[in-house]
Amino acid sequence: MMSKRCAEFKCQAERSVFTFHTYHIDFFMTFAFRESINVLQGDIVERDCLLDAIRGDLGPTQSENCALRQEIAALKTDTS
């Protein structure tokens, strides 16, 4: 009778330890996952700022290119 109780207690204790470890592993994996998501979100924000800056520079450059093409076309017709 005593050994059956000891076996039940041991089994219950092992389940408790397993549950405790599983909970902590899940907690730390969730924490690591959240940290990874935060890092990725920061990278996306940084990338978006860089793209906005490039787009801001691209507009005036395209306008300058268009004006230069028109000027070259005008010079070609004047020299012909």
Image: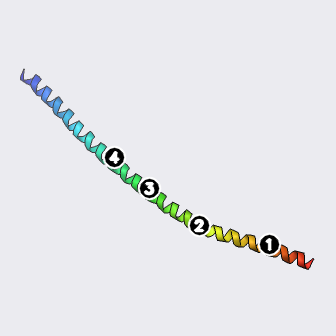
Question: Residue furthest toward the left?
Answer: 2
Q: Nearer the viewer, mark 4 or mark 2?
A: 2
Query: Element at badge 3?
Result: helix
The image's mark for residue 70 is 1
For marks 3 and 1 on the same chain, the one whose residue lies earlier in the sequence:
3
Residue at mark 4 to residue at mark 2: CA–CA distance: 36 Å
Label 4 neighbour load within 10 Å: few <14, some 14-19, many 20+: few
Q: Amino acid at mark 3?
A: Gln
Q: Amino acid at mark 2?
A: Ile
Q: Is residue 9 above or below residue 28?
A: above
Q: Compared to 68, does 4 lie above or below?
A: above
**Residue that numbered label 4 is attached to:** 30
**Mark 2 lies on residue:** 54
In this orientation, which residue lies closer to the viewer: 44 or 6? 44
Residue 65 appears left or right of 24: right
Q: Residue at x 64, y 67 (%)?
A: 58
Q: Residue sitting at 60 percent across and 65 percent down?
A: 55
- The disc placed on residue 41 is 3
Q: Is residue 73 left or right of residue 59?
A: right
What's the amino acid at mark 1? Gln
